[in-house]
Amino acid sequence: MARTLAGGIVALLLAATSLAVEPPFYSNGGGLADPTNPYLATGTVTLSGVPAPAGFAWSECPADSPTSANALGGFAAHRTGSSGAFRLADDFTVHPGELFDLDAIAIFAYQAGSDPDANPFPDVNLRIWSGRPGDQGSAVIFGDTTTNRLLSATNTNLYRIFNTIVDPDGPGPGLPPEPGTTRLIRELRLAADITLGPGTYWLDWQIIPTGSGTAFTPAISIPGVRGLPGWNARQFIPGSTIPPVPPGWENVIDGGTPPQVADVPQDLPFLLFGTYTPEPSSLALLLVAALGRRR
């Protein structure tokens, strides 16, 4: 009887505490509190007042003042024969008392001038690290650099654009860029079957475009904010011979526009799909408490 009672309580606790939230359950921009928002959309009207096409919205590089804005539409994430192998990485934390049971991960990318009706990104590989990529002691715990994990590619109806109010040449009668519709952002959903307990983990991805194309991932874009404390995305640079630059991981930095404004670290958008569940030890504590009350 006691065994049956305990089993029933465990089942009830699992049913009550396993938060099988409709995916996604986590966003790098909003965490568990705002899991469906990748923090890319900045509105249907640019800062300069230009409306987006019907059914679309802008993803505009943010400005923190009328004279200071982010300058980069995105960061290279592609592997091609002509420009080498880039990779991007960003982190998330599973806090004590939590489990993340992942089914899939969504990242975001654009290719300037690509056909909106044809996916230019047929192949994406993914790794998950325990520890920051490039640091001594960090280790890959899932994935590799060869397996294609792409499940789907979906148009987001967001156009990535440069900031429309800050003159890139500094104060004066300059002309900020006009918004365009050549950089359609796509959501790329990737297979990822792993359960993660408490700790800090890094997603590390690379996109292999069609032909010799490119792939750029835009940074998280919050209106009025060039960056936030704790933003720490990484990029693997393939290196070059002229000038001599060794390959390796570097921080993702937006140098800003005009050139004299501060360099600001960036974060990258991603969504986690699957199930968020309290860690098993938490369930055990709940079981003990329930049995104690039963007596």
Image (tube, grey):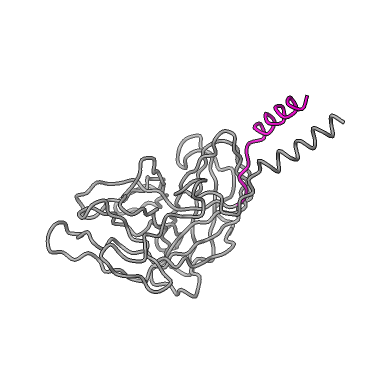
Image quadrant occupied by the N terminus: top right
Side of 196 relative to 295 (left or right): left
Give the residue displayed 30% in from the left and 46% down from the top.
Answer: 264
Q: Residue furthest left?
A: 172
Residue 291 belongs to magenta span: yes
153 relative to 200, above or below = below
Residue 166: quarter of image: bottom left
Looking at the picture, tell me which residue is in the foreground, 83 or 95. Answer: 95
Q: Position of residue 131 (x, y in %)?
A: 50, 38
Q: Position of residue 204 (x, y in %)?
A: 50, 49
Q: Residue furthest right?
A: 1
258 relative to 120, above or below = above
Question: What kind of secondary structure does the magenta stretch mostly adopt?
Answer: helix
Residue 13: quarter of image: top right
How many numbered tags mark residues here?
0
Side of 40 relative to 275 (left or right): left
Give the residue displayed 26% in from the left and 54% down from the top.
Answer: 69
Looking at the picture, tell me which residue is in the foreground, 222 or 160. Answer: 222
Image quadrant occupied by the C terminus: top right
Side of 102 relative to 1 (left or right): left
Q: Position of residue 129 (x, y in %)?
A: 53, 43
Give the residue displayed 46% in from the left and 47% down from the top.
Answer: 90
Q: Position of residue 112 (x, y in %)?
A: 38, 68
Q: Which residues are magenta?
A: 274-295
Residue 288 belongs to magenta span: yes
253 relative to 47, above or below = above
Residue 216: quarter of image: bottom left
